[in-house]
Image (cartoon, rainbow, N blue to C red):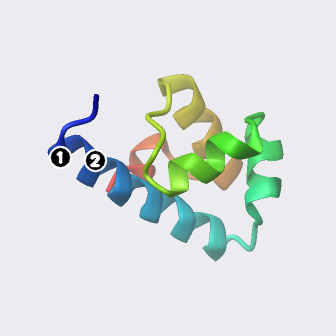
Amino acid sequence: MVDEEDRIYLQSFGRRLSALRIQRGLSQEELAAAAGLQLAEVRRAERGQRDLSVAALADLAQALSVQPADLMP
């Protein structure tokens, strides 16, 4: 179960992920494909409903051409 602090962090992460994706002109589908993730994972991550693995974070960062730390709120 996710506590309130974790929920707020996940939501902040999701907003950051969405903003970077939009800045790069990518759809959620394009980002998911570039990162090798399921579309549902990207959607849930952007809504702050998904706690991603370190590997998934690295894949998203690479797909967005940023460092993994740049995804952190």
- As drawn, 59 above or below 45: above
Task: Identify which amino acid the numbered label 1 is placed on.
Answer: Glu
Q: Is residue 62 visible?
A: no
Give percent across and percent down for residue 44: 56, 48
Distance of mark 1 from mark 2, alpha carbons?
5 Å
In the picture, which quadrant includes the N terminus? Answer: top left
Q: Is residue 69 left or right of residue 57?
A: left
Q: Is residue 53 left or right of residue 60?
A: left
Q: Which residue sits at x=50%, y=25%? A: 53
Check disc 1 and report its element: helix, strand or loop. Answer: helix
- Residue 7, labelled with which disc? 2
In the picture, which quadrant includes the C terminus? Answer: bottom left
- Residue 4, labelled with which disc? 1
Check disc 2 and report its element: helix, strand or loop. Answer: helix
Foreground residue, 36 or 51?
A: 51
Q: Which residue sits at x=73%, y=35%? A: 37
Total numbered badges shown on the rendered structure: 2
Q: CB atoms at circles 1 and 2 under 8 Å apart?
A: yes
